Amino acid sequence: MISPRRAPGWWHRLDVTVRDLPLGLLLLAGSFVPALHGKGTQVGDLATRPFDALTIAVLGLECLPLAGRRRWPALSLALVSLGFAVDQLRGYHSVAGSALPLALISTGAHLERHRRATALVLSVAYVPLAVALHRLGSGGETASGFVTFYLALVLAWGIGAWLRSTRAAEAERRRRVAEDTRTAERTRIARELHDVVTHHVTAMVVQAEAARYLTAAPDRLDRTLTAVTDTGRRAISDLRHLLDLLNPDHGTDTGGGRTPPAGRLLTLVEQTRRAGQPVEFTEEGTPTPSAGSADLVAYRVVQESLTNALKYAHGSRTSVRVRHGEKEITVEVGTDGAGPAGASPAGASPGGSGRGLAGLRERVAVLGGEFSAGPADDGRFVVRARIPAGSPA
């Protein structure tokens, strides 16, 4: 026996025709309740007659096609309409007549092709039915009565069409949300790859260039090549970590998995020093787990700033100051000499990918912080960031 808690899932796994069949069976059974005889829909003024041998077939034709109202809406509506017409012409006036507006709503909601043609055919078919009912009756039903019933049928179709348009609008909204989400995720991945690859490769290129001039000093050459190797290993490790985050089977803790471990800033500074860049590093306070994404953004600010120092002011003195507060993290990186050539207010150098300083500005802005990058009065190029802590974004 299926438990009530599992019934909904079990029910939705059934074919749609099986799920729609009970509605038709319910109307069919209700039509045979003695108290409901003659209480159904009545078009025209034909007298209600008792059920006879043809009744079961007529009522079955009205009700059972509702099982296909979503799978085959046009066919379902045609059969229900035929059964309804016979029902009215025979004068049964059964509860099964309620199947017609239900079929119209379903057809308006689920019919995908030839919608106008279907509505036109049904409208034309209604005319001979109204004429036949008027002639068979005593003439008590006026033209306005037939028009009113037709408008009621139009209303049922309109309700179905409204449901269809609402469903389509919701599907379009979900598609746009999914597309925006994919675009934002691709942008985030591009930034992560830029931060990881650009810094490590820049350091390796600088170290390799320096190694060309150290052939006469084997000890220094060996240290430089070792630094290149270490930098390459870190690049592989960071890329593997990023690819792990992109794996759908990766853990659900999206915040902590992306935050650099303690001590990574010092490692970053040491790597830059080995590439030939004199760096003064000062760190105040201690990173806290409640900092959320602020730690990662602060790390990326320092990483991108040191990468630019290596690229545009190699060998110039650079200072890095990071302060961890309870509510925010502040970062300041200053380099003697010019910064990125022709740096614009947006922070992106001409001809670049636009994912460097401009990407940092966006990262900080997402967390509600402040970011600036440009020449200072003393001629240094300074990058400053104030990053609110505690945001999981």
Image (cartoon, helix red, strand yellow):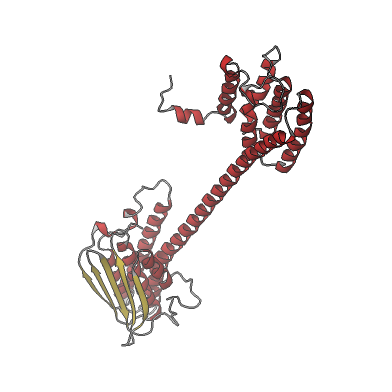
52 in relation to 238, above or below = above
Residue that lies at the very extreme toward the top in this rendered image:
53
Residue that lies at the very extreme toward the left in this rendered image:
285
Left or right: where 222 falls relative to 8: left
Left or right: where 182 falls relative to 102: left
Residue that lies at the very extreme toward the bottom in this rendered image:
378
- Residue 82 occupies quadrant: top right
Q: Which is more toward the observer, 54 or 254?
A: 54
The residue that appears at 40% across and 59% down in the rendered structure is 239
365 in relation to 172, above or below = below
Q: Which is more toward the observer, 139 or 110?
A: 139
Residue 375 % position (x, y)? 36, 83
304 in relation to 259, above or below = below
Left or right: where 87 falls relative to 184: right
Instruction: Say which quadrant the N terminus sits in.
Output: top left
Residue 148 % position (x, y)? 68, 36
240 in relation to 171, above or below = below
The residue that appears at 54% across and 28% down in the rendered structure is 14
Residue 264 % position (x, y)? 28, 63
- Residue 193 occupies quadrant: bottom left
Mark yes or no: residue 305 visible: yes
Report how many numbered discs are placed on residues in the image. 0
The residue that appears at 31% across and 76% down in the rendered structure is 333
Mark yes or no: residue 309 visible: no
Instruction: Say which quadrant the C terminus sits in.
Output: bottom left
Q: Which is more toward the observer, 10 or 301?
A: 10
- Residue 303 occupies quadrant: bottom left
Left or right: where 186 falls relative to 200: right
Residue 267 % position (x, y)? 28, 66
